[in-house]
Image (cartoon, rainbow, N blue to C red):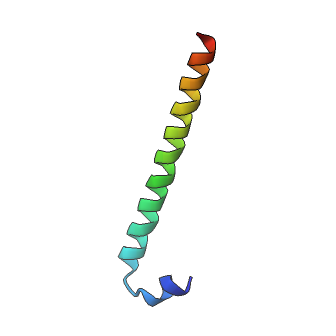
Amino acid sequence: MILERKIPNRSYRKQTKMTSLMANLNTRKKRRMMTLIVKMRMMM
């Protein structure tokens, strides 16, 4: 919170938020892919 307050540029903060959201989505997708692969292997 304190670090965010120090940065006056709002667009920069928005960008960081977007990047973090994208990263979270990517990790979730990867996790889902991993679970799918494991399921497929179990089926085989």
Using residue 19 as the reference point, say whether residue 1 is left or right of it.
right
Q: Who's the residue at 41% across and 86% down the image?
A: 7
Q: Quadrant of the C terminus?
A: top right
Residue at left 50%, top 39%? 29
In the foreground, 8 or 1? 1
Quarter residue 12 falls in: bottom left
Write the residue at 42% across / 75% down: 13
Residue in the picture at 51% in, 52% down: 24
Residue 34 picture location, percent across and down: 54, 32
The N terminus, quarter of image: bottom right
Picture quadrant where residue 35 is located: top right
In screen coordinates, is 6 left or right of 31? Answer: left
Left of 34 or right of it: where is 9? left
Q: Tell which of 26 and 34 is nearer to you.
A: 34
User: Is residue 20 found left or right of 31 in the rendered image?
Assistant: left
| Residue 22 locus on image (x, y percent) | 44, 53
